[in-house]
Each structure stands twice: as structure tokens, then as C-alpha cells.
Amino acid sequence: MARRRQLYEGKAKILFEGPEPGSIVQYFKDDATAGNGAKKGIITGKGVLNNRISEHLMLRLQAIGIPTHFMKRINMREQLVREVEIIPLEIVVRNVAAGSIASRLGLEEGTRLPRTIIEYYLKNDALNDPMVSEEHIAAFEWATPQDMEEINSHALRINDFLCGTFQAIGIQLVDFKLEFGRLWEQDEMRVVLADEISPDNCRLWDMNTSEKLDKDRFRRDLGRVEEAYQEVARRLGILPESGNHEIKGSEG
Ligand code: 5GP
């Protein structure tokens, strides 16, 4: 493939200019980081699996009417997405206490929360993505109240859908992080789901054994990281059932 212009390199993905105006190629790397880059590593095959898992989930979310940036998967590591103006917020949806909410509020990991909780973090590596409130978001105009209404409503629908999807394959969706962007079509603006949904930004626990099937295996040095991502893909029907872990589908 001809060299394309690189637009941005993040911790887990590279963005290239797409083949048509308003499109972007999202390349999934095997690189893994934790603690805002303090810990670095490679999870072999992660990019290929996340490309497939995210494609699978984005297509299913589109089918229930959630607007997303996803256009199509191009090959093993790349997908074509719509260029959006990223809203500089990380939207975290939590069903069960784990990670930062557990330490912040002194909750035991695994405790079901009294209700689903949405939190907002400012996307700012230099500040370690600080948690912010809707007051901050409105005051600093990171998003409008109308954007936030759409974000909150999409986030809750995505949570309902993903909880059901994962429950059906014996996985508890503990929490996850979403990003949204503004998509302009003529004079109309829509808020759409962007980035990716994968074990990199979800906490996924086996419902029977409580085994972690997500990036916490890397963050907490639990080992068998690739195997956990493969297991999620296998249960979603993306990887063949047994032995051979080759991904279905060709490079092209
Ligand atoms: P926590 O705030 O407990 O660290 O994370 C909550 C959820 O959001 C977890 O599922 C975690 O994977 C996801 N998350 C939060 N911040 C980030 C981030 O900067 N990168 C990624 N990949 N996931 C994040």
C-alpha cells in the first residue's frame, strides 16, 4: 500500500489520512501502556484482536441506532473511520466498583454499584486525565449541554447493549471508557461514538471464575494477556473455537 500521511500517533493507535476527504485510517498497534505511559510493553497480536473486536462491537451498536465513526475494516490492523472533531473527554461508565473508583471511594473491587455511574475525565496526558464534572465541562466549553445530553444518552444505551452482549458469553462488563466526536454533515452536527471498544478500555470479568479478561492483566502483571484478549474474541465468535488462534478473514 502507498505511504499515507500520518496525522497522529497515540499510545495504541496511529491515524493516517484516509483515501477520501473526511475519512481516516485507524491503525491498531500491539503497544500497551499503563499509568499514563509509565509502564510500556507489547502485547503480541493485540492490535489485530482489538481491530476485530472493535469492528464487531461498533457494527452491532450501529445496528441498534448508535451513531459511530466506524466505516469498515480494511485489513488485519486497520479500519476506515470518519474524521470527527474529538470531544476532549473520556467518558467512563461503571457498573461494578474496580480500579480508580474503588481506591478513590474505598470500595471493595467487585462490589456492584447502587446504579450505573458515568464519570468524565479531561483528555490531557500532562495532567493525568483529571476527573471533571459537568460544571467544569460547561464552564470551560469542552462540550455543550446539548453534546452532554447526547453523550449521556448514548453512553447508557451502549452500556445496556454491551452488558447484554457480554453477559450472553459469560462475561461481566465491569466498566469501560468511551470517546465521542462531532461529525459535521452539511450544516448538521451529530455526536458520534469514536475511538475503539476493546479489552484495552473495558474491564471484562469471567462470570464464573472472575478471571480478568482485559488490560488489567497487563496493568497488574497478571500474565496471559494475549490469551485473555483471544478469549474475548473467541467468545464473541471472531476467533475459531479451538486450538488454532489464527484470525478469520484475510489481510485484504
Ligand atoms: P479507571 O478509572 O478505573 O482506571 O478506569 C475505568 C475504565 O476506563 C477501565 O475499563 C479502563 O480500562 C478505562 N480507561 C480509563 N482511562 C483510560 C485510558 O486512558 N485508556 C484506556 N485504554 N482505558 C481507560
Image (cartoon, rainbow, N blue to C red):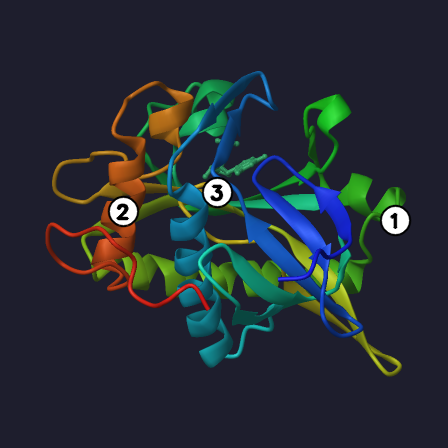
Q: Would you name the residue on which mark 3 appears?
A: 201
Which one is earlier in the sequence, the residue at label 3 or at label 1?
1
The residue tagged with tag 3: helix, strand or loop? loop
Of the pair 32 and 169, the residue shown nearer to us: 32
Of the residues shown, which amino acid type is indicated by label 2? Answer: Gln
Of the pair 138 and 159, the residue shown nearer to us: 159
Position of residue 219 measured from the top left corner of the image (x, y, whole percent)? 42, 23
Q: Would you name the residue on which mark 2 appears?
A: 230
Which one is earlier in the sequence, the residue at label 1 or at label 2?
1
Label 1 to label 2: alpha-carbon separation = 40 Å
In the picture, measured across the screen, residue 144 lies left or right of residue 37, that is right
Of the pair 228 and 140, the residue shown nearer to us: 228
Q: Nearer the viewer, mark 3 or mark 1?
A: 3
Of the residues shown, which amino acid type is indicated by label 1? Answer: Glu
Above or below for 188 versus 250: below
Numbered mark located on residue 185 in the image:
none
